[in-house]
Amino acid sequence: MSDPMSDPASTAAHGAAHLEPTLFGLEAYQIVSIAMLVLIAVMVWKKVPAMITGGLDAKIAEIRKALDEARALRTEAEALRAEYAARIASAEKDAEAILAGARSEAEAILTRAEAESEAMVARRTAMAESKIAAAERAALAEVKARAVAAATASSKALIGKLHDEAADRKLADDFIGSL
């Protein structure tokens, strides 16, 4: 199908022909071209491209600076990580050493406590045996003392029965005579 505006027969049927706008005898595309040239000339005259490239260069410099700072921070972070890893390793070694020392100290305390308890049992046993021996001696001494007391009492009673005054005189005279 053809365009009704481009067909001369249809333009006559619809009325007058379509006219394109013009300015000072220039057609629309020429006006747009001149406007673009004026715009570009003004931009060059006001140094807009230099401003744009300067802005881009400043932005590039900021980005480079941020990247450099990021690299420095990363390096610093890696150094800190390495330092803390070394500290952790050192702390783990210290903890192992402390644990080993505590275990050996506990074993020494246990050994010492066992030895002291054996010595205490031996001392208590010796004390108990000594007390038993002392009790035996005291019991023997008491039995001997009672036996002596009983023998003395019975001897006195027996002597008192068997010896009268006359027998005592005779003994005293014999004793005196032997001197």
Image (tube, grey):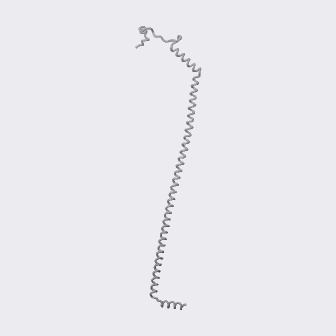
Which residue is at the front of the view, 66 or 177? 177
Numbered disc total: 0
**x, y percentage for residue 114?**
49, 62
19 or 169, which is in the foreground? 169
Q: Is residue 30 above or below residue 80?
A: above
Quarter of the rendering occupied by the C terminus: bottom right
Q: In front here: 67 or 132?
A: 132
Residue at 47% over, 76% down: 142
Where residue 35 appears, as percent x and y from the top left, is 54, 16
Q: Quadrant of the N terminus?
A: top left
Q: Quadrant of residue 55?
A: top right
In the image, 152 versus 35, the foreground residue is 152
Is residue 19 shown above or below 78?
above
Which residue corresponds to the image point at 46% horizontal and 82% vertical from the top-left?
153
Q: Position of residue 16 (x, y in %)?
A: 44, 8
Q: Quadrant of residue 39?
A: top right
In the picture, measured across the screen, residue 55 lies left or right of residue 11, that is right
Q: Residue at x 49, y 65 (%)?
A: 120
Q: Residue at x 48, y 71 (%)?
A: 131
Q: Position of residue 110 (x, y in %)?
A: 49, 59
Q: Is residue 54 above or below residue 156?
A: above
Classify residue 34 by image quadrant: top right
